[in-house]
Image (cartoon, rainbow, N blue to C red):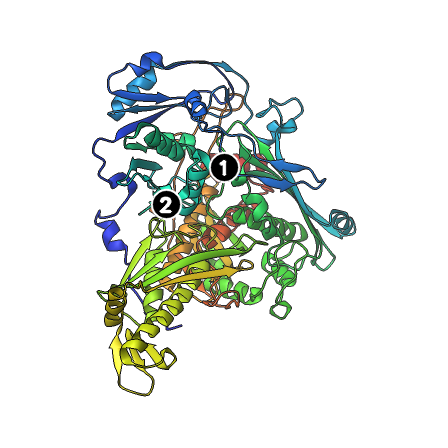
Amino acid sequence: MTAMPPRLGRIEDDRLITGQGRYTDDLAQPGALKAYFLRASIANGTVTTLNVEDAREMPGVVAIFTAADLEADGVAAYQAPLNVEGPDGTKYTATERPLLVSDRIRYLGEPLAMILAESLAEAMDAAEAIEVDFDDLDAVVHVTDARAEGAPLVHDDRAGNIGAIWGRGDWDGTRAALEASDKVVHLRLPISRVTAVAMEPRNAFAHMEEGGRLALYASYQHPVALRADLASCFGMEAESIRVVSRDVGGAFGMKSGPLREEMLVFWAAKMLGQPVRWRADRSEDFLSDEGGRDMVFDASLGLDAEGHFTALSVEVLQNIGAYATGRSMPAILNIGGIAGVYRTPAVAARIELVLTNTVPVTAYRGAGRPEATFIIEQLVDKAARQLGLDPIELRRRNLIQPDQMPWTSPFIFDYDSGDFPAILEAGLKNADAEGFAARKAESEAKGLLRGFGLALCVETSGGPYGRKSDDATDISFNADGTVTVAVGAFSAGQGLETAMVDLAAAELGLSPDRIRYVQGDTETVKKGKGMGGSSAMILGGSALQDGVSRVIAQAKEIAGDALEADAADIEYDAGTFRIAGTDREIEMTEVAKLAAESGVQLIGRGIFETDGPTFPNGCHVAEVEIDPETGRARLDRYSAIEDIGVVLNPQLAEGQIHGGAVQALGQVFLEEMRYGEGDGQLLTGTFMDYAMPRAEDMPLFNCGFHEVPTALNPLKVKGVGEAGSVGGMAAGMSAVCDALAQRGVEDFAMPASPGRVWAALDAAKG
């Protein structure tokens, strides 16, 4: 591969920061009906009255749809399929999730009716006129309450509110190893619920195109999959549907699907034969966006007399909200991360997916990876405190060594490459760990507690693990001398346009300004993985390489005909085809023109498939100052060293680490979705209640890379999009807990808000 040139800034920045972005809500939509959803005002109960007749006569109202209209059109409940086999052989499938609710309400904000009017104000007025009443029932919002004997059932056919049970590992061997250990450390903690809070709220626009094809434009991260879902749900041919997602202002896993509102906008346009648009406001996002994290774990780590790990057991209660679907799987898919970077010989885990009367939980940046890393790293820290050992030294004693690669794990994830000791040492040096004692003394002189937090993390990218994954990228030579790169991957703000254009330019030996980037339109992108799992460069970038090879090979045939030479004798370099060993040549532009005149499209349909994911890994270090008088915890320093394989664009990679770390640290210090006990009412439905991190809450980040190439793809890359979130949550909480432990606080649960920190310190005084 030709080296990618250094770049300052991103290609898409000029367009995005000058208001030239192409977001769905920017589309001109003359005459489009405005959609508004009537939502349930209770979290658990039954609809006893839903009368829309008077509302249908309101000014500007064109239609009001309910579940009865869906049923009349033959539209059934639709959700991502779930297929989990429990440890005892029980087969768990998805719970039925209707697009509009007709009777049973299972969480606050479920859609009951869809109002279509000439203006949003008229649609909202009509919603107020709908006669609706409920038979209200008690709600369960926490996993422990949902699993308690006699708890209200979210679904009558799911005893104990179990959505699914999953387990792996040698439980008998692990228990025996724990019993034989010299020391066993136990830890039980919750991991709080958060929501994506994308800068661009969800929105959609559907209309009938010329020729009779129905198009849906949406703020979405996997258009190809959405087209398939629409076809399946509404009994249509995929070719009769076009899905377009252009610029998307943040997705993070939440804007994947299938999602109810976007699908209903499409269906309403189909039913009415009129364009329909919907945009959620921020309050609606808090009510309806699927959340992330939210679990309680109970873990035990065994150690021998020398501090070597002997066994690890983990049991998780994962709150999946009101419906069990394929989107409930992040904790299961990435639980292998609990083994971490350590040589623990016996590991076992069990996960219960627990149904509650809350909005469903799905993938959120990291999608189970941060939680897994948090569990093992918190256990290691607690073991170090209880044994009186340096947490750094305890980690050194247990690291998988480079000469043990590839590593065959006792628990799921087998690592193909990595140098974990080198990552640790590089991370400590980058963080100036040796200077911590002096900084701690300075903090103490000011009456502040300073904590040092360390997290070693490893994750899967380009997966999921144990399954084949692929992606597609098409490379086209155009008659005007430009090249079109149509990617099956998807960018929702992570800089993929720059990465792909620069990669194509390097592979072709052309200037980046000759490369045109296309994404998210099923008209031109027929196949693709979309956004997810930090897979864009692993799969999509490798597919780009394949596409370049294919289009050049195709073009050599035409160049050979033009130069009266065999294609095997044609060389390509920087836009020129030449007969080897001669000065006879023809430019790519001329070749493209000749192809067009012959009715041939010069296009390389690049495909790359991998048998398994890569394993990015890193060392994250945080330092926190806590004021014991007020409980305020302030992040003072943050650094990270990541092995993401070959680093194609350091600027983009570092930006991804920054962004992921801030999202994780927001959860550590500020963010938490909360619901009222017993009634399931949303207590954090605005930014007055749900605190988001600001620039002033974060220090400057000090990030770097230690490259250990992987052989699992031709670019030798490992993925970076979720790295910051995977290490950030564990490192941030490690620093908080280290500071609090100095005053006798043993176990502390996020978020580290001033009130919670002060209360923990006050309780420790007793």
User: To which quarter of the image does residue 140 belong?
Assistant: top right
Q: Relative to residue 397, is residue 451 depicted above or below?
A: above
Residue at 49% across / 48% down in the picture? 366
Under circle 2, the secondary element is loop
Query: Where residue 364 appears, x then y in whole percent?
Result: 47, 43
Q: Nearer the viewer, residue 185 or 102?
A: 102
Q: Nearer the viewer, residue 687 or 112?
A: 112
Q: Relative to residue 361, is residue 574 depicted above or below?
A: below
Query: Where residue 337 appears, x then y in whole percent?
Result: 58, 52
User: To which quarter of the image does residue 54 belong?
Assistant: top left
Quadrant of the image containing the N terminus:
bottom left
Residue at 33% across / 41% down in the picture? 199
Numbered label attached to residue 193: 1
* Residue position marked by numbered label 2 in the rendering: 250
Q: Relative to residue 668, is residue 180 depicted above or below?
A: below
In the image: residue 212, left or right of residue 489:
left
Query: Where residue 572 appears, x then y in whole percent?
Result: 33, 76
What crowding class fits label 1: few (fewer than 14 Cα within 10 Å), some (14-19), or many (20 or more)? some
Q: Quick one: label 1 or label 2, which is nearer the N terminus?
A: 1
What crowding class fits label 2: few (fewer than 14 Cα within 10 Å), some (14-19), or many (20 or more)? many
Query: Where residue 251 appears, x then y in whole percent?
Result: 39, 44
Q: Nearer the viewer, residue 721 or 702?
A: 721
Numbered label attached to residue 47: none
Count of picture labels? 2
Disc 2 marks which amino acid? Gly
